[in-house]
Image (cartoon, rainbow, N blue to C red):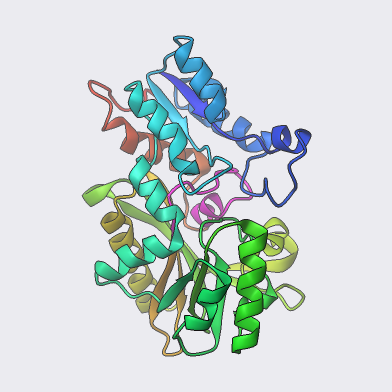
Amino acid sequence: MRIGIAFDLRQEYLDQGYTAEQTAEFDKEETIAGIEQALAELGHQPERIGNAQSLARALTDGRRWDLVFNFSEGLYGLGRESLVPCLLEAWRVPYTFSDPLVLAVCLHKGVCKRVVRDLGLPTADFAVVETPGDAARVDLPFPLFIKPVAEGTGKGITARSVIHDRAALAEGCAELLARFEQAVLVERYLPGREFTVGVVGTGAAARVVGGMEVLFKAHAEATYSTVNKENYLEMVEYRAIEPASLRDALHALSLAAWRGLGCRDGGRVDLRLDEHDRPQFLEVNPLAGLNPIHSDLPILGRMHGWSFLEIMRAILDSALTRVPGATRHPA
């Protein structure tokens, strides 16, 4: 099977003058090479496409694939993660991972939490600040936590993200609004332990790969920021989830959120405990990082006996159920 690979190569954007922060979600060459190698080992013919603009040119030039492995994040706007799947749907080309609606909903953390709340699943109370004046109208008890409403990889999250009073809330929201040119999610701060859970599959067939606790070392920022993520070997420690009763509760909440939001094929759900040690949904990443060594999904997979190749196999098996006449990969 010919499988195109849609991606955003970080170095290409850096070469064009974009900053390290603007490109933090994009992939290194080693990530793309790792995915390419895994697809080949599974018996397929991988072919690099590139970003949404490269895909658009390829489609109009008549290039086609049996399936596109899409992990392109996009650069601008609330619909940036939906660009590639929208193009592929217009040309009726099957692809991996979630559809445009799900990607847009999950990217906007406020909309995502509204859906999760409507599903009856636990998530911290929150507000969305669109303008500096909105901060004064936030009616939530302190402490609070603030972050850009539609960023990943810990962008905009620092030690100053924990807010203790009105003045800090106004200042923090104003800073994020100006810096990221998007709304700010304000939510009740959850003081408990932090976790991430990996999921593969779609709908009733979705299953948990495993989960891990994220602990911050003494010299790290006390949040899962970009600095901590990019320097995780020095800043972060990962542990298996204990006790078993907590692990089961986190797995159940992750699966319920994954299925309720309509996520497909593979990704991660982030969770944290409240002051009563009750699991709360934070956010979902339906386009989780896939660096074979350094990304959270492969890391937690290794902790639970899943090789990178096995994770890729599960993602493809799920996606191929949507390809008419397709059989599972040959290798």
Is 306 displayed left or right of 113 in the figure?
right
Is 266 displayed left or right of 325 in the figure?
right
Q: Position of residue 51 (x, y in %)?
A: 56, 30
Q: Which of 322 and 150 lies nearest the eye of the viewer?
A: 150
The image quadrant of residue 65 is top left
Please check the rendered image and state whether residue 289 is part of the magenta-colored stretch, yes or no: yes
Number of labels in the image equals 0
Q: Which of 224 and 171 lies nearest the eye of the viewer?
A: 171
Image quadrant in which the N terminus is located: top left
Is residue 156 among the parts visible in the rendering? Answer: no
Q: Residue at x 39, y 40 (%)?
A: 97
Is residue 100 among the parts visible in the rendering? Answer: yes
- Furthest toward the top, the residue is 62
Q: Residue at x 29, y 71 (%)?
A: 121
Image quadrant in which the C terminus is located: top left
Asked if residue 191 is positioned above or below residue 60 in the image, the reply reads below
Is 177 displayed left or right of 99 in the figure?
right
Q: Position of residue 59 (x, y in %)?
A: 45, 16
Asked if residue 182 is positioned above or below residue 26 in the image, the reply reads below
Please check the rendered image and state whether residue 143 is part of the magenta-colored stretch, yes or no: no
Magenta-colored span: 284-302
Q: Which of 117 and 249 lies nearest the eye of the viewer?
A: 117
Q: Position of residue 161 (x, y in %)?
A: 63, 75
Q: Residue at x 74, y 48 (%)?
A: 20
Is 61 displayed left or right of 13 in the figure?
left
Asked if residue 212 is positioned above or below residue 73 in the image, the reply reads below
The image quadrant of residue 238 is bottom right
